[in-house]
Image (cartoon, rainbow, N blue to C red):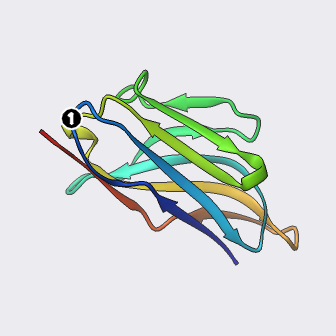
């Protein structure tokens, strides 16, 4: 079984920074393409950023220039560096990744979510 475990959320003032991590554990062999999503209260889950297995990235317009997605393939870990945080960035952030387990089976995995709260 493959699990994605997020960490790094918390409470921060506007203009501040946070770095989220998403580490794969269990019977993971390799993570492929992945991304970060977020869901604010009363809203649908939205895509924040994606990263391919080769490191190509894409961002939602609302976070371009402020957030950076990255990965460490050796650690099967993805990151989301969030700078210049705004009130509207408040949400539960989820990581998602496609990957292979040690038996060679492909799957799509979600983390449990981590709360990011931006206050004025």
Tell me the residue at 37%/54% (across/down): 9
Quarter of image, res 2: bottom right
The image quadrant where one finds the N terminus is bottom right
Residue farthest toward the bottom in the current orientation of the protein: 1
Q: Is residue 44 visible?
A: no
Residue occupying image coordinates x 76% and y 74%: 27
Instruction: Give the vertical position of 97 relative to 110 (above or below).
Output: above
Q: Residue furthest left?
A: 120
As drawn, is 79 to the left or to the right of 65? right
**Nearer to me, 41 or 114:** 114
Instruction: Looking at this view, name the residue that lies furthest to the top.
Output: 65
| Quarter where residue 31 is shown | bottom right
Picture coordinates of residue 5 (x, y %)?
A: 54, 65
Residue under the image location 40 percent in, 26 percent down: 66
Q: Does dot 1 land on a helix, a strand or a loop?
A: loop
Residue position for label 1: 14
Q: Where is residue 30 shown, x and y percent of the image? A: 79, 57
Residue 94 in view of the camera: yes
Q: Is residue 90 left or right of residue 60?
A: left
State which quarter of the image contains the C terminus. Answer: top left
Crowding near pointer 1: few (<14 within 10 Å), some, many (20+)? Answer: some
Q: Nearer the viewer, residue 39 or 12?
A: 12
How far from the left and from the top, in percent, is residue 45? 37, 52
């Amino acid at each position: 079984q493959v699990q994605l475990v997020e960490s790094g959320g918390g409470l921060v003032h506007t203009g501040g920074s946070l770095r989220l991590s998403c580490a794969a554990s269990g019977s993971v062999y390799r993570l492929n393409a992945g991304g970060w999503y977020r869901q604010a209260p009363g809203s649908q889950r939205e895509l924040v950023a994606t990263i391919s297995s080769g490191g190509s990235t894409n961002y939602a317009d609302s976070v371009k220039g402020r957030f950076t997605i990255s990965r460490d393939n050796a650690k099967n870990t993805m990151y989301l560096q969030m700078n210049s945080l705004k009130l509207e960035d408040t949400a539960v952030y989820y990581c998602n990744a496609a990957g292979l387990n040690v038996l060679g089976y492909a799957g799509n995995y979600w983390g449990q979510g981590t709360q990011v709260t931006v206050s004025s």
